[in-house]
Image (cartoon, rainbow, N blue to C red):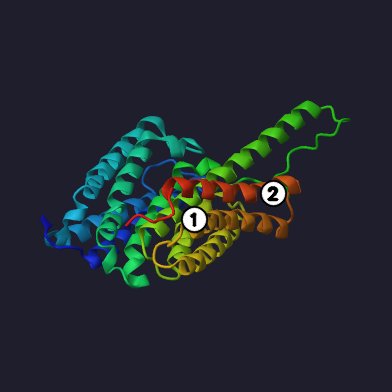
Amino acid sequence: MFTRTARNPRLDLLVGAASLWISWAFFIDAWSHENLPYETFFTWAHGLIYGGMVVLVAVLAIMRKEIPAAYRVPLIGVPIFLLGGMLDLGWHSLFGIEEGVDIILSPTHETIGLGLMLVSSAPLFSALRYRSEMRTLRDHLPMIFSLASWLVMVHFATAYATDPAAGIVNAPPDASAFSANYFTATAISYYKLVGGVVILLLQSFIMASFVLFIASRFETRPGALTLLLVLGNTLPALPFTDESPLLVSVFAMSALAGIVGDALIAWMGPFPRAAWRFRIYAAAVPATYIATYMVAIALTGGSWWDWSVRTSLVLFAGVIGLGLSLVMLPSDNVPA
């Protein structure tokens, strides 16, 4: 089944695109659960998920004589995905259709997600083996689709920590000293703020991890990071918009952070030539991502968070990126 072919760019592109299709379908399904009254496993949204895997398997079957050895481990994900799908049908039959956080924590959904993350890693494994052959943005597309699929699935696994709810529309009850519900309102305000802060710190960590990986492993072309962040971040906001500007805000956050990152990668040169440039990049991209969120909130009705919290979180995002860069690149020289 596996050939001695060094790399199959066409197969990488098709598998990467199919993987991204399936990962996006997860969030389209999540949106449908939030907005449509489902009482059955057989829905159009599930059809998108499993239809994407049918396409992926069909591609592998048609090109079975051209599959490189880099696919050996990732292809284990196909039977895991299909097993998870069959178990999911039985799970729904026994326990009904999940709602809310239960959708994320369902063991059958986690099994399906594991299968997808494995098979979607194939183009990334291929790219890591043959980085010298990736000279154009088109050459980078399979790897970008692969990483974007991973980013989407990370967002799915942490979907309960997507929206920090810093907008004024999400403000807690007034904790006036003259209110009969003073202590309750104060507790709600405290936990809503703490929850929002933790969400933004988690999102900063996720962003920093992906942008540091791509910059330290690949000689990317302009637009690669922007494309990765837009593809990997925007659609996961769909189920949580509720007629809010969150979807547009996440697109702006991803696009601006990506543009800043692409510019800094161009400045750093092929792989960062000096650790201090890598540190600047590591801090600037997640900080830009969170700063854009703060600006978007200010422009779309304001925030109930005070300026101390908002500015500190932008700086904290940069510190998270900087700290991760010290782990990923501890010396002044970039490893070959």
- Mark 2 is on which residue type? Arg
**For residue 124, side relative to residue 29 (left or right):** left
Q: In which quarter of the image is the N terminus?
A: bottom left
Q: What residue is disc 1 on?
A: 233
Q: Quadrant of the C terminus?
A: bottom left
Where is residue 289 drawn, in percent x and y? 57, 56
**For residue 7, side relative to residue 325 (left or right):** left
Closer to the camera: disc 2 or disc 1?
2
Q: Quick one: label 1, few (<14), some, or many (20+) residues within 10 Å?
A: many
- Mark 1 is on which residue type? Asn
Residue found farthest to the front: 332
Q: Earlier in the sequence, mark 2 or mark 1?
A: 1
Using the image, determine if residue 195 lies above or below residue 225. Answer: above
Indicate the quadrant where residue 215 lies. Answer: bottom left
Total of numbered circles in the picture? 2
Indicate the quadrant where residue 64 lies. Answer: bottom left
Q: Distance between the residues labelled 2 and 1?
A: 21 Å
**For residue 230, side relative to residue 140 (left or right):** right
- Residue at image position (59%, 54%) is 287
- Image mark for residue 310: 2
- Assign a secondary structure to mark 2: helix
- Residue at image position (37%, 43%) is 41
Where is residue 192 drawn, in percent x and y? 67, 37
Using the image, determine if residue 317 lies above or below residue 223. Answer: above
CB atoms at circles 2 and 1 under 8 Å apart? no
